[in-house]
Amino acid sequence: MANRNSEAVLQNIDWMLVLLYLVLVTMGWFNIYAAVYNEEYKSIFDTSQSYGMQLVWILTSLFIAFAILVIDGEFFPKFAYILYGAFIFLLVVVIFAGVEVKGSKSWIGVGGFRIQPAEFAKFATNLAIAKYLSNINIKFEKLSTKLIAAALFAVPALIIILQNETGSALVYASFILVLYREGLSGNILVLGLVMVLLFIAALLVDEGILSIILAVFAGCSFFFVRFKLNNALTVGGILLASVAFVYTVDYAFVNVLEPHQKKRINVLLGKEVDLKGAGYNVNQSMIAIGSGGLIGKGYLNGTQTKYNYVPEQSTDFIFCTVGEEWGFLGSTIVLGLFVLLLLRLIFLAERQRSTFSRIYGYGLASIIFFHLAINIGMTIGLAPVVGIPLPFFSYGGSSLWSFTILTFIFVRLDAYRFQILR
């Protein structure tokens, strides 16, 4: 019976998704080698170097992937809440007993290695959201359903913020896209966009002047709507909420954010020029990418890479190695592979017979999309530096293991799609 089950899984595996995973992981490995290339250590298999250790992470990831594929497909929906609770507990433990790395207390020491639970909590959160929303008694139209679903990803995000790991916490906002697919009003997304724009405006314009501008806009709105008491109350309420938000942003920026965080935001918005401090990483990354031109300088020939001009080049800024050595064409190919991966995930999610599997698939696609957009945005100066790795490319065991688990759980669910799952 077990052999038949294994054969059925192998027959139903989406090998295109597996192939995309293997291609991206392999390309990431070679780019990590290029990012830290040293003529004294020429062997790509040297485990004393980061690229050698990345090979170890890749091999262990393949073992993890195989282990997931032989697990019964019903395991994931049945144990979704248990896994979620276990990782919430682990995230809390990290706050008190974690290892501090670069100001972030989000790591647990295991022997000679460090593991970041915040990375693994993503798949547990994805499972929990899929489990909750796929319950036959759940009606997404209810406000309580939306609030509970939002709380499922807000709770781990808030705990991670307490670990001073803002970048990892921001990733959990990607689950809003999952809620949108399940029926969340587009007005919520528009509201979110407006809040982002208002947040940026609050940092660029004096709050008093911005409040006056908002009041003028509110007054002008009556040219487009009838002046009725209900309309006036609505516009007035929006105006008051907007002004309050503006002053909240200013207060939080001054009193809550750390000095280095303020510096990064000011540099990103052009309020400060600090090419030797907070803006150094991004500036060097942009120089590296720009110097690659159309076809790049060639593999292992990146000057910015060889002389370590870009800090964290094998982790958060790995994409600048692609830009410098492979050029615009190579960067386009890499981005094209990620887009193909996202499109494949969406296609597979839509063909699922199980609501649970569909929601999980969209969660996976949303997480990868968010990582991709923010990471590349960091390297070209369009997003603040928040320490988000590029999926499958950036050096690190926790990141690669996390994305491997996320991906192959969906591969297993998709292979199990002919069975009935809630």
Image (cartoon, rainbow, N blue to C red):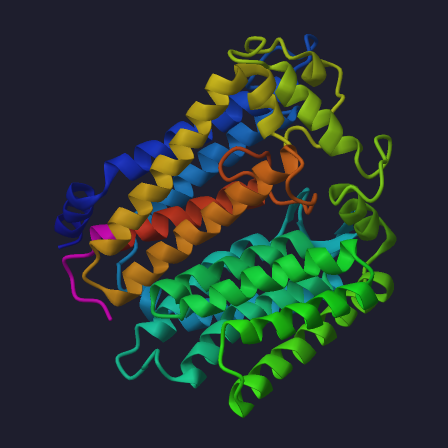
Residue 311 visible (yes or no): no
In this picture, residue 234 sits left or right of residue 167? left
- Work out whether 283 lies above or below 330: below
Residue found at x 31% / y 37%: 18
Residue found at x 48% / y 64%: 189
Q: Quadrant of residue 132?
A: bottom left
Going by the picture, which residue comes out furthest to the front?
Answer: 223
Dominant SS in magenta? loop
Front residue (pair 307, 402)? 307
The quadrant the C terminus occupies is bottom left
The quadrant the N terminus occupies is bottom left
Residue 270 location (% of width, % of height):
78, 41
Q: Is residue 415 magenta?
A: yes
Residue 145 location (% of width, % of height):
41, 81
Residue 119 location (% of width, % of height):
56, 52
Front residue (pair 181, 46)? 181
Q: How many marks?
A: 0
In this picture, residue 291 sits left or right of residue 294? right
Residue 102 location (% of width, % of height):
79, 46
Front residue (pair 41, 392)? 392
Residue 320 visible (yes or no): yes
Give the extent of the magenta segment: 414-422
